[in-house]
Image (tube, helix red, strand yellow):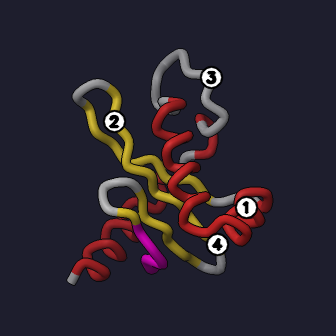
């Protein structure tokens, strides 16, 4: 996994095995968390057309939909891939920051 791009305190765009992932920095009240999704075909197309601005909007949408809330209706709720890829993402971000 490697970092392809980032927006300070908002998101990281990561690549792993030919797939792109957006790791959005979110919070719910005083609780901060990361929420990572694999970009689907529609999101990849929008990213191709809109670049970083699209990723800013997508991260914003993820954050404000509060996908981790118990009673959420977030369209991102069932798309989280943070758990199986968190170790790889953490290593990639650490290496990128050096």
Measured Cα–Cα span from mark 3 to mark 4: 26 Å
The tag earlier along the polypeptide, 4 or 1, is: 4
From the viewer's perspective, is residue 82 above or below residue 21?
above
Range of the magenta residues? 1-6
Front-most of 71 and 51?
51
The tag earlier along the polypeptide, 2 or 4, is: 4
Mark 3 neighbour density, 10 Å: few (under 14) some (14–19) many (20 or more): few
Mark 4 neighbour density, 10 Å: few (under 14) some (14–19) many (20 or more): few
Task: Read off the residue under disc 1.
Answer: 46
In the rendered image, residue 5 lying in the magenta stretch gets the answer yes
Determine contact: label 1, label 3, CB under 8 Å.
no
From the viewer's perspective, is residue 62 above or below residue 91?
above
In the rendered image, residue 97 lying in the magenta stretch gets the answer no
- Quadrant hosting residue 16: bottom right
Image quarter where the C terminus lies is: bottom left
The tag earlier along the polypeptide, 3 or 4, is: 4
The tag earlier along the polypeptide, 1 or 2, is: 2
Measured Cα–Cα span from mark 3 to mark 2: 17 Å
Label 1 sits on a secondary structure element that is helix
From the viewer's perspective, is residue 27 above or below residue 72?
below
Report x, y in % for residue 9.
31, 55
Measured Cα–Cα span from mark 1 to mark 3: 23 Å
Label 2 sits on a secondary structure element that is strand
Label 4 sits on a secondary structure element that is strand
The mark lying in front, picked from 1 and 2, is: 1
Determine contact: label 2, label 4, CB under 8 Å.
no
Front-most of 74 and 89?
74
Task: Read off the residue under disc 4.
Answer: 19
Task: Read off the residue under disc 3.
Answer: 73
Front-most of 72 and 52?
52
> Residue 27 has which mark?
2
């Amino acid at each position: 996994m490697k970092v392809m791009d980032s927006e300070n305190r908002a998101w990281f765009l990561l690549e792993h095995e030919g797939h792109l992932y957006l790791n959005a920095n979110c919070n719910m009240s005083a609780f901060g968390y990361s929420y990572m999704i694999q970009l689907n075909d529609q999101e990849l197309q929008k990213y191709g057309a809109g670049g970083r601005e699209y990723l800013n909007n997508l991260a914003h949408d993820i954050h404000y939909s509060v996908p981790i809330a118990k009673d959420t209706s977030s369209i991102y709720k069932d798309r989280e891939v943070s758990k199986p890829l968190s170790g790889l993402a953490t290593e990639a971000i650490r290496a990128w920051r050096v």
